[in-house]
Image (spheres, rainbow, N blue to C red):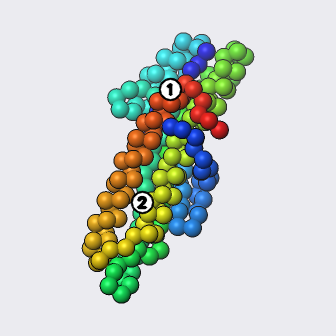
Amino acid sequence: MLVPWACAPAGRLSSPWPGPGAVESGLEVKAEERFYSVSGTSASALNLSLSLRGPRHGGRAAHAITVWRLDWSYVPTRRSSTCASGRPRVVVDVVTTLPRWEDLEVASEGLAKDWAIFQERLRRHESGHREIAVRTGRELLSTLGDLRAQDCDRLAQEARRLAQQLASGHQDLKRRFDQATDYGRLLPPR
């Protein structure tokens, strides 16, 4: 039996992530799937191929991985004696790497069924990481939209500080998600 071993990038993720290229007011999501090849006609050979060819995260092998980054901007706008952030924009760039089995057509029916279950669980787990990325983008967009400071230099400093703080907090959320799902061995809540 194949057991998913994924990583990232707890709890119920409530906000669905928009599809690739989706744009919400000020939020754009760019999502890409990449694949690496695995081979084998037995569960042990396939598991070995997954371990040897899979992506690495924090020095350990994974069967799949989702990485993301946020790009953000705003237009500094003077309002009487303060500076505010106008027209905030956030781009969430998400890349998920998954295995592609080269020997699927010649494998036993049982192993092919196990692979289908394995793939569905991997995708579901990595979808949780995408949701975390999009949630982070939405929170950053909201945070940027509410910023005010005495001058525009202080506004820029505060925007950078808040973005870094938010990103650090969501790294912890990714870690807790992986722990709660045992790195993909347990299904995340729907």
Q: Residue at x 39, y 76 (%)?
A: 84
Mark 1 vs mark 2: which is more N-terminal?
Answer: 2
Q: Residue at x 35, y 79 (%)?
A: 83
Quadrant containing the N terminus is top right
Left or right position of 176 against 119: left
> Vertical placement of 160 versus 84: above or below?
above
Q: Nearer the viewer, residue 117 or 104?
A: 117
Looking at the picture, which amino acid does disc 1 mark? Asp
Q: Is residue 134 visible?
A: yes
- Residue that label 1 marks: 182
The Cα atoms of the two marked residues, 1 and 2, are separated by 30 Å
Look at the numbered disc 1 and give the secondary structure of its residue. loop
Left or right position of 80 against 111: left
Q: Residue at x 53, y 14 (%)?
A: 45
Query: Decide: marks 1, 2 in contact (CB < 8 A)?
Result: no
Horizontal and vertical percent position of residue 113? 70, 21
Q: Nearer the viewer, residue 159 or 130?
A: 159
Horizontal and vertical percent position of residue 86? 44, 76
User: In front of the other: label 1 or label 2?
Assistant: 1
> Vertical placement of 190 versus 52: above or below?
below
Q: Which mark is residue 64?
A: none
Horizontal and vertical percent position of residue 190? 65, 38
- Residue that label 2 marks: 71
Mark 1: few/some/many CA within 10 Å (<14, 14-19, 20+): some
Q: Residue at x 32, y 74 (%)?
A: 149
Q: Identify the residue at the far bottom of this view.
A: 80
Q: Identify the residue at the far right of this view.
A: 109
Look at the numbered disc 2 and give the secondary structure of its residue. strand
